[in-house]
Structure formats: C-alpha cells, structure tokens
Amino acid sequence: MFEDLKPAPADKILALIGLYRADPRPNKVDLGVGVYKDSAGNTPVMRAVREAEKRLLAGQDSKSYLGLAGDMAFNDAIAKLVFGADADTARIRAAQTPGGSGALRLVADLLKRARPDATVWVSDPTWTNHVAILRAAGLQVREYPYFDADAGMVCFDAMLAALRGAPAGDVVLLHGCCHNPTGANLDVRQWAAVADLLVEKDLLPFIDIAYQGFGDGLDADAEGLRIVAAKVPEMVVAASCSKNFAVYRDRVGAAMVMTAKREQADATMSQMLVGARTLYSMPPDHAAAAVRIVLQDPALRADWQAELEEMRLRMLSLRQRFAEALRRQSNSDRFDFVAGHRGMFSRLGLTESQVERLRDEHAVYMVGDSRINVAGLPEDGLDELAKAIVSVLD
Ligand code: LMR
C-alpha cells in the first residue's frame, strides 16, 4: 500500500523549527515561526491564562462532551472580542475550533457546501497554509496583488483593480490585521473602500484574524473587520487564540459566520458543524475553557490585556529600533518600511539565496521569502544582525 509514497515536502515555516534546534552555534537567531518570544527568548504561559488553568483544574467536575461547537460561552465571548462588545450578534454564529487552522478549514468546507464553484481570492503573498487549506476543501484559489516588495507597502490600487474583476459570488480572503507574511496592513480608509467594493461586486469577505492585539491594540486591530461587518450583508471569519492568549499547542480558535438574515444563522451554523463532525467531531476543550474564564472575569481580563499590551509594545519598539539599525548599517532608507509595519512580521525583500546565506554564514533563521518574526529580534544585537543582513545584499 505505501511502497510508492515519497516523503511529503516539509512545510517551509515549520521546517525551520527543526533546523534551528539542530544548529549548535551559540549566537544563532530565530526569526522563523510566528510564535511570540520575550527578551529572554521564551514563550511564557500568560499570567491570566495560568490562573484560569488553576481555576479550571480546581473546579472542573466533568470531561463529558460539550458538543460540536465546543464551549458556547467561549464562542459568545470570542465573537464579542472580534466583532466588538456592542455588536449585534443576532446574525452571527461562532464555533470553537482546533486553532485558527481548524477555523479556516471549517469555513472553507462551509463555503464549498454553500457555493461549490466559488473561487477564493487570496493576497499575493499570503500565509502558505491558506492556499493548502482552501485547496484541501476543494475550493479554487486565485491571487490578487497585495504587496509592493520594493516599497514594502500594500499596492492598494492594484489590489482593488484585481478584485473589481472578480466574478460575483466569489470569496475574498483578507487578513484582519498584522498581515502574514508582509506586516503591511490596510488602513481604515482602505478597509472602507474594500468593503464598498465587496458590496458593489457581490463578493463574500472571509477575514482571517490571527493576531488581534499584536498590531495597534485589541479594538484597533479589529476595526477593519468591523467596518466590513457594518457594510456587507454576510461574511465569514476565522479567529485564532494561539498568539494573543499564547495557547499555541493547546489549539483554540473560532469559525464564525454572519448571515444576511437572522433566520439563516442557525441553519448555516448547523452546516458548518457538519464539517466539524467529519473532521474531528469536537474541538479540544482545555484552552477554550481557559480563554473563556479569562474573558468572563474582569480582573483576569484586565491582566491579560495588560500583558498583551506589553508584548505589543515590545514588538513595536523592537521594529523601530531594528529599522534604525538597518538604516545605520546599510546607510540607506531601504528598510525604513519595517518601522511602519505592524504585528509580528515584516518581509525584508531578500532573495532565497540571501536568506540561505544568512542561515549558513550567520546562523540567522528566517522564512525563505525573507519574512522575519519581530519578536525574535535580539534586543542587544540589532546592529550585529543588521550588519549580517547588509553583508548578504548584492
Ligand atoms: C506562522 O505563520 O509562522 C504561524 O502562523 C505558525 C504556522 O502555523 O505557520
């Protein structure tokens, strides 16, 4: 049965974890996978999450099944976190999923069921797993231009022009904030223009929000999504708690759908849950329960927000200091865009061979498309790192 199988190609992002671990050089720098790290290079359990876990351990009296949608109180809390505390959720339904990837797949399966011939338009570039998940659900994928690599900015006119040509009924996948891999984001005015276009051309927004709180703040990062939600009749959302609650390996996210009429919401949710039943039945509970406890308890919630804010501000300051170091070492403004980006990533615009040289000659690890994880930048070695980067430029 298996004799003809060749090894599957390694995932470009996840493969870096193993390569970095195997590198014996003491001065190695990990700018690879999108996991937050503190100044000591650790990814700690957040204080409020740890306290919620303690309460869970002390108070949980059953591990019986909760249902296909998981913890409904978690679902309610996460829908409000994303759509806003005052959002009218009568047309919105949320299902707890195993991480943001689980949410993406559940939404993708729902789209396939609702409109089998729809094409999903993704940004060029986008997170590599987007395309893989959409294709695994049997959906067609096309790209819209998004990033001007020379300027390090969104090429907004080209983006709008491409979306204007998309057939009615197609789906547009947008990054809610902190675009992965580029770090270049739409501003509020651009979000409003995209929302108008989606309405005019009858395109369905599919918003992936995996880094809420890592860019400009919890509400500011959801502003684009909320602008869209206020204008379009229906939309789908995949949210992740991996990063903003630092519960990566425990896997919790949410698939959400907003229907045109409130009478359609329950039927649509039930169709979304068919996907859950056939993929994994019920999502893992632990991290969702912890997140629910944090979001429902005012003191824990305030502490979580404070720690998240510390993380955000650390990344912001690191990216500003790194942009300055690059300016000093390159004697140019070529990398100034790093300071203007938001979230965990920036794409530096290096070639694959320059990225390889950085790894081989300087023990600096980044994704092959030159995406860096800002949280991995060495606080005390920014000039040294910038010098290494400049040394591999043509
Ligand atoms: C990333 O983009 O590095 C993260 O979202 C981790 C992953 O699953 O790729």
Image (cartoon, helix red, strand yellow):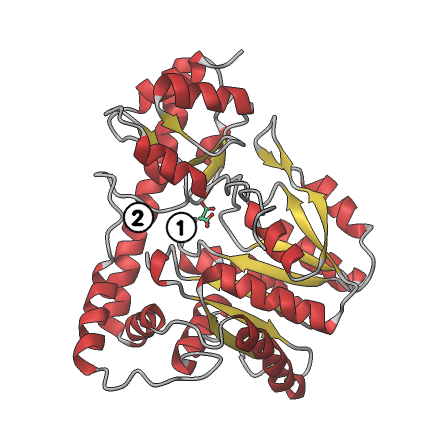
Residue 72: % across, % down: 43, 82
Residue for badge 1: 214
Instruction: Measure the C-alpha gap from mark 2 to mark 1.
Output: 7 Å
The disc at residue 79 is none
Give the amino acid at mark 2.
Met
Question: Is 188 rendered above or below residue 382?
Answer: below
Residue for badge 2: 311
Q: In this rendering, would 94 be left or right of 172? A: left
Q: Mark 2–mark 1 contact, CB under 8 Å?
A: yes
Split into 4 quadrants, where in the image is the C terminus?
top right
Say which label, 2 or 1, has the lower sequence index.
Answer: 1
Residue 374: % across, % down: 38, 37
Quarter residue 137 falls in:
bottom right
Q: In this rendering, would 222 be left or right of 236? A: left
Q: Residue at x 79, y 64 (%)?
A: 117
Q: How many marks?
A: 2
Question: Is 359 rendered above or below residue 217?
Answer: above
Question: Could you say whether the residue bearing mark 2 is in a helix, strand or loop?
Answer: helix
| Residue situated in front as seen by the camera: 132 or 266 | 132
Disc 2 residue crowd, few under 14, some 14–19, many 20+, Cα 10 Å: some
